Image (cartoon, coloured by chain):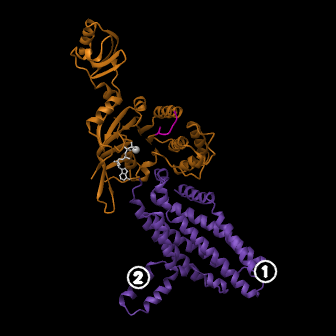
Amino acid sequence: MSDAPLPIETRELSKTYRLGFFMNRKVRALQGVSLSVRPGEVYGLLGPNGAGKSTTIKILMNLVQASSGEARLFGQPSQDCAARQEVGFLPENPAPYEYLSGAEFVRLAGSLGGLFGRELDRRVAETLGEVGMEHAASLPIRRYSKGMIQRIGLAQAIVTRPKLLILDEPTSGLDPVGRRQMRDLVSAERARGTTVLFCTHIIPDVEALCDRVAVLVSGKLVKEGSVRDLVTSQVPLVELVIEGLGLSQVRALGEPLQFEQEIGQRVTVRTDDAAGQRLLRAVLSAGGRVAQLSPARFSLEDLFMETVAGAKQKVGGEIN
Amino acid sequence: MIRVFASLAWNGFREARRNRVSVVIAAFTLALVGASAVMADVTVYTMRRVVTDFGLGAMAILLSVMAIFLSSGLLTREIERRTIFLMVSRPVSRGLFLVSRLAGNMLTLGAMLLVMSAVFFLQLIVFGISPSAPQLIAAGVLWFELLVLTSFGFLMSSFSGQVTSSVVTVGMFFAGHLANDMYELSARSKSEVVRAAGKAVYYLLPNLERLNYRGAAAYEVTPPLGEVFQSALYSVGYSTVLVALAILLFNRRDFR
Ligand SMILES: Nc1ncnc2c1ncn2[C@@H]1O[C@H](COP(=O)(O)OP(=O)(O)OP(=O)(O)O)[C@@H](O)[C@H]1O
Ligand SMILES: [Mg+2]
């Protein structure tokens, strides 16, 4: 690896929100989260509601101060405003100034990011095109729908062509076309060498876009790795679709089943490879028919469900 | 940095314009016209005094209310509406953001002051009264009074909500105008504690009467320019301290 500083690096990051009049109620939103994002990679942050994804991002953007631990952007402490020079940020539910038009807001964001003159004009026009907002760009943001605001939020994040994009639920509120555009946009950014960190609940997006993912549960990092490794590290299963036998009859054949389902005349089961072969033979000799035998794709979604269930997640951080 | 400052300050001015602060100017103009209709037959001397008194007074009240309204709660409002996320996530420090927003407010108030003064002087001319230096000074120094109010509003807004900060800023406005009186009252007290408290309050509170040259204008007294300059400097110094405090508090705040 080169010794260029990592776009994002956090060490033992913790955040405890103190609430109530005497600050005696505590919510532990993050507990010792260490992660690093390498240059040029797309990194997905997954986790159930209240897991601490937004909190992590807010600490990176210096909107919230960590209770302990440290966060660095390109090697600089996230508290320094110079660390944000090369960063574009889309918060969850972005709120641009409503009295401005979309174009005016993107222009303001560009000028705060250091653009000016012709360059600024050019980038504003380009960016509005990229997010498909050129038609409504002169309308006041007050008149925008949620998805339109989301698009303007995205536009202001990419207007300066940052080296690092941090996106908090970028597809929330977007229509299917917008979601596809969002995915294309992230792919395009990756192709340009931009590093992207984003969090989302839409796992297909993660599978399609991310090089690596981290799963946060209750403020703790419970899994991190490349999408491919995480998915293929699981034991491969096969799926059998059986006709002519009821579920109870299939069960009676005595093979261990990971998954079972009976719809109408069809029974679908999953099991490991060896048991699958034995089951196939048993079904046939019991007078059933195997309509289909296929490798069961173990998806990131399954992994996610399993991880969350394993961590015994209550929604949100620890409250005491 | 200058560019960032200018963009943010200009944006603040634009915000005020779009939120129709011009209504306040219209109200001021109407008040002046209405008032002059009431005074049909008075001597020129009385008229000069009354018109000056009323015009400058109305200007001061309206603009002070504006200053308090625009500044107190501004930061908290930005946090509550989450508009601030998209601003301070730029390579812009919170301090610079705060100072630029304050400059935007002062630009707005300055522009309003200019327009109102123009209306005021126009009215004088219509009445056949020639504008004078004391009136000009009174109007100019008003801006420095507004600077103190605005800085105080920002300080309050850096840690408390809209309601608290406007109530406290209004309180400060009155106390600041009564600072002299309170000092003198307490100085006459027999109690040591009251006297000490009076002194403390006197030195802590901004002395807003020091920035009030409206009485002098009504009576056509030209204040010495050195003194006017000192008053302006006092206002800038006092505001700097307030803003420094505001930045200190604001820097520690979590936005969530
Ligand atoms: N302002 C706040 N005050 C107190 N607790 C908070 C605050 N903001 C967040 N929390 C707590 O911190 C924890 C993590 O919240 P966070 O917003 O980071 O979750 P998230 O992973 O982004 O969830 P979601 O998927 O719902 O957006 C939650 O338990 C939440 O209750
Ligand atoms: Mg969130």
Residue contact between numbered discs 2 and 1, judged by CB atoms under 8 Å: no
Q: Which chain is purple?
A: B
Q: Which chain is orange?
A: A
Is A158 located above or below residue A305 in the figure? below
Name the side, left or right, on which A250 lies relative to A177: left
Which one is nearer the viewer's eye here, A120 or A148?
A148
Which one is nearer the viewer's eye here, B253 or A305?
A305
Query: Where residue A247 is drawn, which disc sits there?
Result: none
| Pointer 2 or 1: first along the chain | 1
Q: Is residue A125 visible?
A: yes
Is A109 located above or below residue B50 in the figure? above
**Mark 2 and mark 1: Cα distance apart in space:** 47 Å
Q: Report how many numbered discs are placed on residues in the image.
A: 2
Query: Regarding mark 2 in the picture, which secondary structure is present there?
Result: helix
Question: Which residue in the protein does label 1 denote?
Answer: B128
For the residues beneath circles 2 and 1, the answer to whether they share a chain is yes
What residue type is disc 1 on? Gly
Look at the image and give the residue range highlighted in magenta: A170-175
What residue lies at 71% left-to-right and 71% top-to-bottom? B30
Query: Could you tell me which chain the residue with mark 1 belongs to?
Result: B
Q: Quadrant of residue B201?
A: bottom left
What residue type is disc 2 on? Ala
